[in-house]
Amino acid sequence: MAVVDTATSNGAQRTQIAPVETIIPQSNFWDKYMMNGTPELLPTRFVEWDYFVKGSPMAHFVGEGVTVPPTERPKFKTAQIECPLYQYRKVLGLQDLAQRQVGEPHGSMPPAMFKTIQERAGKLEAEDDIECVNAVAALRTKIICKFLFEGIVEVRGHGVNREIDYNLPNRIRLLGSNRWGQPGVDPIKDIRTWCELLEDFGFNPVEIIMGRNPWNCIEDNAKWIAQLDNLRTEKGRFAPEKAADYGNAAYMATLRDPFVDIYTQRSKYWDDISKTMVSHLPENTLIIVTEESKRNKFVYGAIDYMENGQFRSVPGEFIKEVWHDDRAATREIVVTSRAVPIPGNVHSWLVATVM
């Protein structure tokens, strides 16, 4: 830990130690885990795709001298999305540089120990650049979770209020006496039924990622205990593997029927509307994951801007613009993105609100 010996105006000695800084962590688990398809850069801000379900063909019995009617071709639907625009902006001015920054020495000390305005500006400019990119990435993670768990993206902010609805099919909400924890409800039967639903579309469930409440329901149910792989228990207690990084999924147990791993995941973000910390994965929700469901992807819509007096349109993960105003003595940075999630296959995962 760095220390600085300084003196007060009356000559008394004091020592300044390094500042204590608390940084709230961010999690990009859902970005890394469920968005592994190859991203696409679009020449426009609109994206559309066709999707359909194609059945397994099977011939028909016919009588002698009779021709079978022709099989209809599968009908498809077309989805169109206007890629939402989101950005983060910071302005650095002389008022930010006039006073000492966190950790700088102060008080009565040799002038050489004070940082110059240029030194302060360089440090704050680098911090602003990182903050802007991280802020855009944090909103992108929130968008991913809304897409995965609710099938919608609420585009609400400064001068915009609309909703993107993906019409995802495998979304289930248990109500009333059907909720987990209610008398007579068999969570294993529910999970088995949902896994079979995915299998009927040709997708093999490999993991179930749960919020806290569904997992607590498992721990309190003796029938669940009997279904768990006993290689992962010790003296009647679960032996979970703790996630190394904030927000990573933690392994808890393995079901035997269906044979699938169970994880819990908890990470939160600060919601400006409710002024509270909100879970990325809702606490009463679980998601059944297949390998195909990890192949969702980002598309990046084109962003319009001006450079050197010319209008331009370019796509990219993060578009950074920087302006310097000599008269106002300010430096402004804006980081913009039009990232929007696109499903690899809308039938490849299932989300259930169980409590």
Image: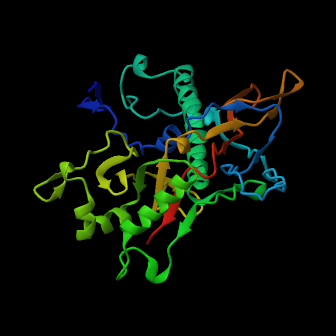
* Quarter of image, res 64: bottom right
Specify the quadrant that holds the N terminus: top left
Residue 168, percent from left and from top: 65, 57
Lateral position of residue 276 relative to residue 188, left or right: right
- Classify 130 as above or below 146: above
Colour pattern: rainbow
Q: Is residue 207 above or below residue 37?
A: below
Q: Nearer the viewer, residue 182 or 202?
A: 202
Q: Is residue 249 left or right of residue 61?
A: left
The quadrant in which the C terminus is found is bottom left
Residue name at image x 36 percent, y 28 percent: 108
- Whole-percent x, y for residue 70 in the image: 84, 52
Q: Give the residue drawn at x 64%, y 51%.
A: 346
In the displayed structure, 201 sits above or below 102; it is below
Left or right, 344 with respect to 34, comes to: right
* Depth check, front residue: 157 or 39: 39
